[in-house]
């Protein structure tokens, strides 16, 4: 839990300055209060619930989510009511065709209109598009019971679906503008679970209730339960329209007053296709998602026959059907935390291959419970892939083209489903049952199993293709990447990527960072390791110039953005000249301040949107992250008093107490958002106590790693050597006795 004004992950959404009163109680970072804060790396990880609470605290997203949930509930209720109405408007066997007609009319518009709808979402005001389509859907749903003709039901159904096609990309493209990039995944988890888990169940319950209450027309004599459901459904769209009308942020670039490029509709349509064709990431996503949905269609189309072949009837079919949704739910809910550190590009391809493998095995399964397990596994991987793909579309595709990309994917998904639902039953019928005599044994092949096998192969194929298209070019072998991500072994991940171990010290002014950096470096050297101490800003020759500028009170007029760029420039040089080479050489590198300082000082202190600072730092460091960040936490008034006892206040130290309070809260919130990577210590404790706690954690971190060792350990463990200054330590680049070996047994 966080204090007032903060997000659940302790950080504000993109574009929002950190509230000065945002308080993250340190005691909540660790179970036992402030004194136990050093154990924060243990149990208190930020869970999905906290992340979801955080996104729900963003007012516009919360309102959009609620109105989407309402529309989704209405949609499901509408589907139940429409299929019921179609059935009741036609007698006898023809009712099945009426039902099929409803489904065909539901899927068809996507193929015809999907790309147009996408261009619309990018070209016109998304909020107005959503409001108008919601009002029209309200009218159409309400008209079905009033007209009461099957032909109108088909037409209305077609029009409703066509309108939804304009609504969905407008909504999907708007959501990423309301959130920070890292919030998009939990937001998608919430939306997918709401749309495919919660609202269909609620709609089924409400439909059943309406049936029970008004089945014989006792409540409203002239209206049956399907009519009631349709009116209720119509109302949900009207309410959604009213809510969305009051959310100007949905208008995206228009809300921010940005000029939107005016181009012809055809041109923007063509640009959409050309973008998808020429962008590897989108190509990979389109291939992967479409292929996966063809496979999903095969599973749906063969499910009845497969259920019969494992010795079950309708009950087995129901179980297998339920198992898909259980798997999907687990995949969407738990997938991201299982594969936390794996890039979403890699995760997408890997998950599709996983789903394909489960399908391949399913084709050879004759036992119901094994089939159920495999289907849960298939749903699990499919859920992960869907979430990863959807999130990548939101985070990686620029706002101006996002609507078209979402719409293209949406059309292809529906086309894939229609195609496989239409073709597979014929293929199953044509293939029937064959026994192949293979000499030693004979093999019975049935149409549905062959189709499942082919679907499995197809999914594996598109998974590999998508992986190749989307691979982010990291040198880490896939298997090791997956295994270390699942094991959450961040140190191993760094070693895979290049080597070395990076430890950052963070905290406010006078927290004792330099003192502890020096002590840790001395201890590691005494233990026989090549350990380098360095700092920001100013550890390189050009960085020294930058340090002089940013800390000099004579430069009081430096604009916040210039300041952020100066620190980023210092960091880029630092990473290039000092950190990367040392890490590549397998050294333990200890830096006094790193990216978190920019997030805290320039982000929260100067109120630059945190995501901007994060992106700048990510660019400057090429994504380099510490394996461990030691946060020395101290009330700013104590730290500033310590620092002033040392020298006159510099430009940053001269900032207000409020500024330093925001800096402190942001450091703590960052630590809370990723507790495995942080050690939070109360900096009011004595230097010896702090140093001892750090040694324990670092010994744990380094244990067993093949790091650079000194052939001759430095003189004694007693600390009797003369201490070197930060500058000396930072420039100690040459280790004549260094050799690669396993980390010696450390003695904290
Ligand atoms: N645990 C501690 N308790 C009390 N005083 C401390 C402690 N650690 C360091 N100090 C003293 O506080 C002052 C600041 O320490 P130090 O320079 O290590 O902090 P810092 O975090 O690097 O500061 P800055 O970021 O302002 O450079 C020094 O005089 C140091 O001796
Ligand atoms: C890296 C970094 C630092 N700062 C600020 C924080 C301090 O006030 C000074 C550095 O002084 P120190 O005595 O070396 O700690 O710079 C910042 O604002 N942003 C940064 O990225």
Image (tube, rainbow, N blue to C red):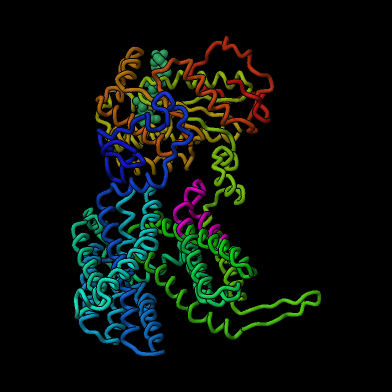
Judge by depth and name the residue closer to the eye, 607 or 726.
Answer: 607
Mark yes or no: residue 465 visible.
Answer: no
Residue visible at 45% across and 56% down in the picture: 332
Look at the picture and state if 18 lies above or below 206.
Answer: above
Residue visible at 52% across and 32% down in the picture: 502
Identify the magenta region. Answer: 329-354
Residue visible at 38% across and 41% down in the picture: 614
The quadrant of the rendering that contains the N terminus is top left
Q: How many numbered dots are placed on residues in this image?
A: 0
Task: Name the quadrant containing residue 211.
Answer: bottom left
Q: Position of residue 328 (x, y in %)?
A: 47, 60
| Magenta stretch holds residue 304 | no
Task: Name the quadrant containing residue 159.
Answer: bottom left
Residue visible at 33% across and 60% down in the picture: 173
Look at the picture and state if 676 lies above or below 508.
Answer: below
Q: Main secondary structure of the magenta part?
A: helix
Q: Ligand 2 is located in which of the four quadrants?
A: top left
Q: Position of residue 108 (x, y in %)?
A: 38, 79
Task: Name the quadrant containing residue 46.
Answer: top left
Judge by depth and name the residue closer to the eye, 744 or 22.
Answer: 22
| Magenta stretch holds residue 348 | yes
Judge by depth and name the residue closer to the eye, 304 or 551.
Answer: 304
The quadrant of the rendering that contains the C terminus is top right
Q: Position of residue 712 (x, y in %)?
A: 68, 19
Mark yes or no: residue 87 visible.
Answer: yes
Q: Is residue 652 left or right of residue 528?
A: left
């Amino acid at each position: 839990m966080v204090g007032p004004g903060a997000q659940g992950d302790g950080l504000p959404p993109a574009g929002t300055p950190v509230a000065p009163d945002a308080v993250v109680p340190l005691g909540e970072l660790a179970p036992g209060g402030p004194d136990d804060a050093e154990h924060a790396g243990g149990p208190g990880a930020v869970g999905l619930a906290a992340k979801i609470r955080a996104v729900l605290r963003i007012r516009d997203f919360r309102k959009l989510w609620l109105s989407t949930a309402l529309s989704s509930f209405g949609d499901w209720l509408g589907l139940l009511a429409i299929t019921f109405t179609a059935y009741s408007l036609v007698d006898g066997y023809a009712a099945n065709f009426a039902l099929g007609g409803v489904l065909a009319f539901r899927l068809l518009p996507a193929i015809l209109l999907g790309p147009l709808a996408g261009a619309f979402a990018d070209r016109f005001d998304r909020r107005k598009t959503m409001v108008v389509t919601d009002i029209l859907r309200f009218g159409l749903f309400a008209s079905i019971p009033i007209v009461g003709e099957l032909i109108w039901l088909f037409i209305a159904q077609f029009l409703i679906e066509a309108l939804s096609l304009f609504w969905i990309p407008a909504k999907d493209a708007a959501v990423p503008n309301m959130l920070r990039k890292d919030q998009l995944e939990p937001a998608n988890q919430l939306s997918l679970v709401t749309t495919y888990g919660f609202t269909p169940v609620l709609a089924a319950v409400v439909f059943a209730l309406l049936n029970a209450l008004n089945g014989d027309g006792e409540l409203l004599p002239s209206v049956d339960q399907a009519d009631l459901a349709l009116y209720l459904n119509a109302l949900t769209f009207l309410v959604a329209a009213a809510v969305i009308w009051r959310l100007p942020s949905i208008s995206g670039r228009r809300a921010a007053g940005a000029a939107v490029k005016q181009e012809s509709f055809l041109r923007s349509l063509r640009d959409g296709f050309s973008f998808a064709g020429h962008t590897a990431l989108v190509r990979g996503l389109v291939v992967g998602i479409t292929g996966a949905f063809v496979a999903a269609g095969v599973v749906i189309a063969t499910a009845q026959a497969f259920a019969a072949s494992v010795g079950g009837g309708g009950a087995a079919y129901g179980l297998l059907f339920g198992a898909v949704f259980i798997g999907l739910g687990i995949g969407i809910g738990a997938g991201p935390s299982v594969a936390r550190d794996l890039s979403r590009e890699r995760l997408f391809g890997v998950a599709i291959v996983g789903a394909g493998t489960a399908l391949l095995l399913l084709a050879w399964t004759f036992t119901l419970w094994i089939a159920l397990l495999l289907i849960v596994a298939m749903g699990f991987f499919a859920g992960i892939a869907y979430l990863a793909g959807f999130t990548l579309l939101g985070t990686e595709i620029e706002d101006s083209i996002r609507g078209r990309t979402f719409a293209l994917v949406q059309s292809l998904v529906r086309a894939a489903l229609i195609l496989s639902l239409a073709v597979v039953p014929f293929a199953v019928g044509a293939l029937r049952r064959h026994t192949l005599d293979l000499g030693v044994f004979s093999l019975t092949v049935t149409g549905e199993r062959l189709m499942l096998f082919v679907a499995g192969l197809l999914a594996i194929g598109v998974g590999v293709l998508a992986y190749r298209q989307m691979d982010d070019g990291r040198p880490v072998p896939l298997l090791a990447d997956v295994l270390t991500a699942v094991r959450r072994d961040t140190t191993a991940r760094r070693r895979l990527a290049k080597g070395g171990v990076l430890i950052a010290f963070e905290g406010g002014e006078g927290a004792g960072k330099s003192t502890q950096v020096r002590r840790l470096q001395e201890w590691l050297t005494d233990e026989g390791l090549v350990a380098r101490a360095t700092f920001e800003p100013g550890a390189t020759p050009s960085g020294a110039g930058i340090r002089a500028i940013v800390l000099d009170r004579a430069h009081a007029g430096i604009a916040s953005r210039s300041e952020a760029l100066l620190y980023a420039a210092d960091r880029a040089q630092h990473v290039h000249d000092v950190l990367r080479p040392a890490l590549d050489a397998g050294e333990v590198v200890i830096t006094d301040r790193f990216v978190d300082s920019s997030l805290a000082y320039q982000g929260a202190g100067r109120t630059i949107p945190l995501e901007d600072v994060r992106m700048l730092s990510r660019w400057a460091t090429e994504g380099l992250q510490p394996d461990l960040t030691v946060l020395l936490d101290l009330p700013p008034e104590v730290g500033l008093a310590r620092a002033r006892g040392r020298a006159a206040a510099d430009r940053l130290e001269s900032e207000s107490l409020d500024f330093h309070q925001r800096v402190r809260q942001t450091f703590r919130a960052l630590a809370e958002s990723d507790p495995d990577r942080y050690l939070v210590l109360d900096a009011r404790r004595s230097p010896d106590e702090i140093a001892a706690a750090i040694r324990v954690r670092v010994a744990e971190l380094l244990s067993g790693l093949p790091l650079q060792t000194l052939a001759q350990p430095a003189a004694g463990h007693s600390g009797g050597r003369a201490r070197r200054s930060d500058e000396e330590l930072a420039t100690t680049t040459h280790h004549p006795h260094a050799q690669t070996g396993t980390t010696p047994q450390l003695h904290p």
